[in-house]
Amino acid sequence: MTIGEIKLDAMNLMFARSESLETLEQDENYRDYMINLTGAINRSFSSIEEKRVLPTKAKALTNGVVRGTWLRFEYNEFDIDRIVFESDTEYRGSVSYMVEGDNLVVENKTGTYTLIYRPTIPRITSITLNSTELDIPDSIASAIPYYIKGDLYRDDEPDEASEARAYYEAQMSQIQKKSDGVQRCVEARYSIC
């Protein structure tokens, strides 16, 4: 979906039945809402990130620094889902790791590590083009207008705002259930520290 499609859907959910954002921007009745759309959209992005519903992405961890039995990688504050280890003889879908300041620390083993993380959504500004495509699945983006309605309507129509927000939250809950991981085994390790 584009930014413009989200804005138009949100305005149509609230009250305006229009096929053009330009028409709404010129109408005195809707100008305040149109101005406040950018902030509401950015708040919806924060909510989506917080709920961790965006599909994960993978990034190979390279250029690690070896210190004894540990391997340190520069860490750029990704929202880490898990770290995968793979070698010629072993695949571990989730390994233990630690974050120390700007470093991601894993066990120094021969093989490759891949960071599986939740991406962030670039924020928009008032000059972001309405034709800008969002890198968000449509199943998630289609719920954003309900968040916007709940956000912008909370003073004018609190009941409708509550209903819209409840719909948004229900959609996010459904998406969270679909993306929950599965634990297939428990690995027991013992050590004396």
Image: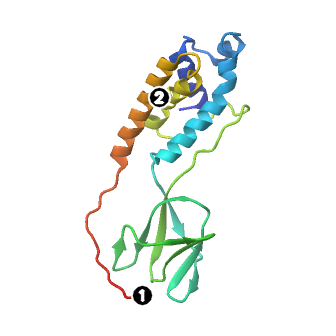
Determine contact: label 1, label 2, CB under 8 Å.
no
Q: Tell me, for residue 99, which label it has, or none.
A: none
Say which label, 1 or 2, has the lower sequence index: 2
**Residue 115 drawn at (x, y percent):** 49, 65
* Left or right relative to 174: residue 53: right
Q: Which of the 4 quarters of the picture holds residue 188? A: bottom left
Relative to 191, say whether 75 is above or below: above
How crowded is the residue under tag 1: few (<14 C-alpha within 10 Å), some, or many (20+)?
few
Question: Which amino acid, by three-letter code, is at mark 1?
Answer: Cys
Relative to 120, say whether 34 is above or below: above
> Does the rendering let one see residue 133?
no
Determine the CA span between mark 1 and mark 2: 49 Å
Q: Tell me, for residue 193, which label it has, or none.
A: 1
Q: Which of the 4 quarters of the picture holds residue 87? A: bottom left
Disc 2 designates what residue? 165
Q: Which secondary structure, mark 1?
A: loop
**Residue 158 drawn at (x, y percent):** 52, 19
**Residue 176 drawn at (x, y percent):** 38, 44
The residue sitting at 66% across, 21% down in the picture is 34
Relative to 181, say whether 150 is above or below: above
